[in-house]
Image: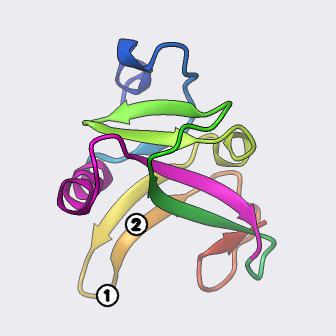
Amino acid sequence: MTAAETAPTAAEGTKAAHGVTLSATAAAKAKDLLDRDGSPEMVLRIAVQPGGCSGLRYELFFDDRSLDGDALVDFGGIGLAVDRMSKPYLDGAVIDFVDTIEKQGFTIDNPNAQNSCACGDSFH
């Protein structure tokens, strides 16, 4: 993705950009899921919350809320929102979608994670 592709669109107004990238594969899967089960106002939100065996855990879900301080970037018709508190933990992260015989689902490659647990759902 180039900087132009990850910059906020004019429709987003004053929303700040964030440093999280959504791969084309993940954007297509999210769009399929949203078209099937969601509404046009929803965005994909990634957040970091306390919990998990390593101290912090990721949350990835569709959201129709707009939080104060959200950073929002459009990837292929899917808005990816990051709240103000999560942004420093996620800067440089890449969200992808894998579909293999061994695993299916969204993955998060986060350069800020110093350690992660064996299940891959939490980090430090």
Q: Position of residue 33 (x, y in %)?
A: 25, 61
Marks 2 and 1, how far apart at CA? 13 Å
Is the residue 44 above or below the residue 123 in the image? Answer: above
- What amino acid type should be assigned to the residue bearing mark 1? Glu
Is the residue 72 above or below the residue 57 in the image? Answer: above
**Residue pointed to by mark 2:** 106
Of circles 2 and 1, the one toward us is 2
Is the residue 104 above or below the residue 123 in the image? Answer: below
Give the quadrant of the N terminus: top left
Callout 1: few (<14), some (14-19), or many (20+) C-alpha neighbours within 10 Å? Answer: few
Q: Position of residue 109 (x, y in %)?
A: 53, 58
State left or right for residue 89 relative to residue 12. right
Callout 2: few (<14), some (14-19), or many (20+) C-alpha neighbours within 10 Å? Answer: some
Q: Which mark is residue 51?
A: none
Q: Which mark is residue 102?
A: 1
Give the quadrant of the C terminus: bottom right
- Residue at left offset 34%, top offset 82%: 103
- Residue at left offset 44%, top offset 46%: 64
Task: State which quadrant residue 25 falls in.
Answer: bottom left
In the image, is residue 31 part of the stretch drawn in magenta? Answer: yes
Magenta stretch bounds: 25-51
